[in-house]
Amino acid sequence: MADSVKKAVSFNTPFNFKTSWEKAFQNEEFVKVFSEDILENYIVNRRWYAGKASTLKYIEVVDFFKIESKIETYFGVLLEVNFQEAFFQNYFMPLAFCPVKDLKSGTTISEVSFNGKEGYLMDAIHKEEFRKLLFEKILGAGEENPALKVRFHKGEAFKEKKYEGSRFMGVEQSNTSIIYNDRFVLKFFRRIYINTNPDYEINRFLTERKKFGNTPAYTGSVNLHLGKDDDITLALMQELVPNQGDAWEYMLKELDKVFNNLKTKNIRMERLPEVSLFKRLKITDIPPEIIDWAGLNIFMKVKQLALRTAEMHIALGSDTHDTAFTPTTYNSDYTVWLKNRLIYQFQNRLNTIENNLHKLDGLALELAKQFLDRKKLIRKHFLDFDWTRLKSERIRIHGDYHLGQVLVNGEDFYILDFEGEPESTIRDRKVKQPPMKDVAGMFRSFHYAIYSTIFTNMENYSYDKNDLFRTGEILYRYLTGVFLETYIEKAQRENLNIGYIHEIEFLLKYCLLEKAVYELGYELNSRPRWAVIPLEGIASIMNYN
């Protein structure tokens, strides 16, 4: 370690820097030791750190800025984490220095001293003074100053007068969310991209431009301006929607009731009427045997969710001025991008399944072998995407749409989290896609919810697992049929160009297959017994089951 940085004997041997905190990031030795000796040990243990499966090579501070109050200085630090596997990720971390006498939280990064002043480096989000400062800067934001590097913005829906208090929302995950005044949520994006975050972009567009009421209203943001077209979204603030939890947990509870009904209502599973995949169904089209078994409520909720989904897409596809949201047709560039992406993913999943066959048994093993036997057919399906035959339009979509991205509010639903697929680049997330991709994402989520309910509660149902799977597949087709009828009717009535029935079915089948193949890799690597879910999905879509 350099001479200017020494381990002190007192105060439990902190790092002792010969500079003030206010000038820390202008000091080369501090930056070097912070990156190499302090940060590496801290960041790998954070829940929001996405590099745990890779080998860390080094961390570099690529930029920093100050956020100052009248009495304290905080730093916003942009980090580049480089990996041995030859890729990197960028992260944002707000930093505070807390003198020993002022420490109120046990969440610290390291003991340090600056010019003999002893204290702790902290993630600033854990200091209430910093959280209050952010809120007040958004509250006081006016016209954007083009000279400022850090830009605070106040949304139209933000009518608050003062800071009352703040607390963390749940357990920290890939982002950190803070609740203010019990009425607003500020989401800090930990992993960042040199571009505006789609969540900020779409949420602000939907609520301020399109007045879409079924997503939390945009109330403010923090962005970092690096140059002409380089803006980084650091944080997004929205209204806090009163809710009874997310639609995933709601659906699991409803499905548990449905499967319990098999015994309590003495349902003859072998006599339940089946329906073809993608058949559009009004509530009145559902056979009485299915209503008797599953009840009416679950279908009414699916109908309402379909309506809100269609309204979201209508809003996203109705702008004619902002090029980021103007609907567009299919073309050869999009087709090349799509096929390259999917064939690469498909080959990766093929390798994974070949290497993990020994982990499978029963139905999962049988379906995996069918998947391998028909790999040419599946690959051909991906390559058969012919843009010249498609008359519908592509729009900005949610991109990672599933039951966990929807809040239950009484009898209604609120859609949130527009960041897009975690594995995709920020540019790929902003590519305009068929709305059917979101519909397919929700259908796959229905499928997962059915199988998750069976896996979790199997001992309570007293039926053979494969019989439960077959019954679950019947229910899945009725749920998706009701969703499709409501969605298509609303979308077409509002002139959202999703195409006619053959095109809708082609795009839906294509997107469902893409989603199921995407899921397969995760399940084989993380929980092989659940691989039966995407494998069943693939078999159903390809009609070889």
Image (cartoon, helix red, strand yellow):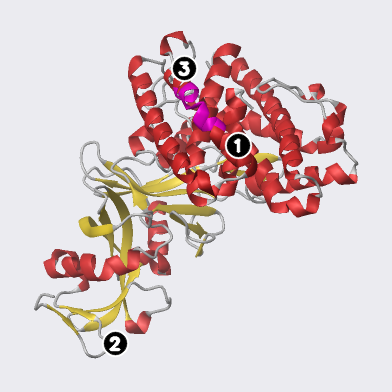
- Check residue 313 for magenta coloring: no
At 16% from the left and 66% from the top, the residue drawn is 32
Q: Which residue is mark 2?
A: 12
Residue 387: image location, x then y, percent: 42, 13
Q: CA distance from mark 2 to mark 1?
A: 60 Å
Q: Is residue 116 visible?
A: yes
Location of residue 101 (image quadrant): bottom left
User: Mark 2 or mark 1, which has the lower sequence index?
Assistant: 2
Residue 327: image location, x then y, percent: 43, 20
Mark 2 is on which residue type? Asn
Mark 3 is on which residue type? Glu
User: Mark 3 or mark 1, which has the lower sequence index?
Assistant: 1
Q: Which residue is mark 1?
A: 366
Residue 11: image location, x then y, percent: 28, 88
- Check residue 371 for magenta coloring: yes
What kind of element bears circle 3?
loop
The disc label shown at residue 393, or none: 3
The magenta segment:
370-379
What kind of element bears circle 1?
helix
Residue lying at the far left in this picture: please name it: 3
Give the vertical position of 321 relative to 304 (above or below): above
Main SS category, magenta section: helix
Q: Are marks 2 and 1 in contact (CB under 8 Å)?
A: no
Location of residue 538 (image quadrant): top right
